Image: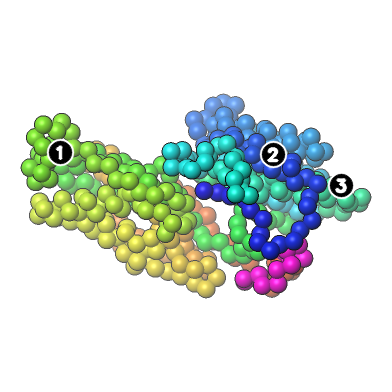
Amino acid sequence: MNGIKKKAGCKMEESKYAKDIIQRTIQIIQIPSVKSEPTEEAPFGKDILKVLETTLELCHQLGMRTTNIQNKVGYAEYGAGKEEIGILVHLDVVPVHEEEWEYPPFQGVIAEDRIYGRGALDDKGPAVAAIYAVKRLMDELEQWNKRIRIIFFTDEESSWADVPVYLENEKESTFAFSPDANFPLIYAEKGVLHLELTISNSHDWLIAFSGGSRPNIVPDLAVIQLSNELKEILEIPEETQRIIKKFQGVAAHGSLPEKGDNAIVQSLEYLSEIESKLGEKAVFGSLYELFKDYHGKGLGMNFHDDASGLLTFNVGQVRKEAQEIVFSVDIRYPVTYKKQQILDHLSLYFSNIKEIFSKAPLYHDLKEENMKKLLEAYHQVTGDADNGI
């Protein structure tokens, strides 16, 4: 679950906007802004359009200038000057399985001094906090020599199709940061690579194979259908009409696969056991060995560096198409590596690789002036001298 909670031991002045921040955060959590079927008016789905319009209207009411670009991305700004400080947030969220939540994910329930709901931390809560941080500056500053612009992206959890739209219509900020991470400061971010790995299915006894919703989510469900010819070897009653096996996992973000339990990997292990019983070529057995480690050890890709840590590897989706099986994977690779290194390495194991999405790593030296200023702001506000960096 996602939650917002005051930092332990942090003495901060109670904001006069505290109640508004809570109410508005709950308001936009209640909009289930998961990417859905596009329409002419709503390119990422009606709920994503609703959350964008609702957020821009809030900013307008608070006195900011607002702009909506093609119903895909918007911004609110205040101040004057050529230089622009950008605050990059996103209002879309990943899908949920509501039955697995202790509190309903789209209600914004307050419990145990927290707000529970999908997006409370990623990234609706921080977006609302940024809005009211700017509002406080609007109240307290009489003269401005810079503009502050909050940019509301709406496709961050999917394909980032909103970013090119923004850059086609607006200039990049002079300096920008995103409150979509942990305190005190994230200065390195791994590269992201979404791929489809396709293999030939030589086993006629596998009728259907599906699982997962997105590459960047650890799948909590995988389903296979097997040929009735396997009833005897699997000790399944003859009266059974169809052999269907479901595998239950635990969902998590694809960047943190260790927090989940991958249902597709479970299914591969089961299929490998069937291969063994039949004495057939270990297609799924090999895949299980390649995919079972979420740091890519099976693929010999346990790459790491001091700045960003270990590579992560998540098998997020699988589908069977005729005599082929397609696996969609999410790879987060360390900042000192390049995308081509990952692709070259995977080509040793797979001949059919299709790139779906990629984002290069990000890295900033802590000695940079802007990095120093961000850390200094953190120290001043929290009083936390031990920043953990």
Residue, x 20% and y 54% (percent of image)? 272
x then y, percent, for residue 367: 69, 73
* Earlier residue among tags 1 and 2: 2
Q: Which residue is mark 3?
A: 139
Q: 246 or 375: which is nearer to us? A: 246
Residue 23, numbered circle: 2
Could you tell me the amino acid type at mark 3?
A: Asp
Q: Which residue is mark 1?
A: 227
SS for dot 1: loop
Q: Are marks 3 and 2 in contact (CB under 8 Å)?
A: no
* Earlier residue among tags 1 and 3: 3
Q: 271 or 165: which is nearer to us? A: 271
Residue 381 magenta-drawn? yes
SS for dot 3: helix
Residue 130 magenta-drawn? no
Q: Tell me the magenta residue range.
A: 378-389
Could you tell me the amino acid type at mark 2?
A: Gln
Task: Please state, as top left, top right, bottom left or bottom right, where the C terminus lies in the image.
Answer: bottom right
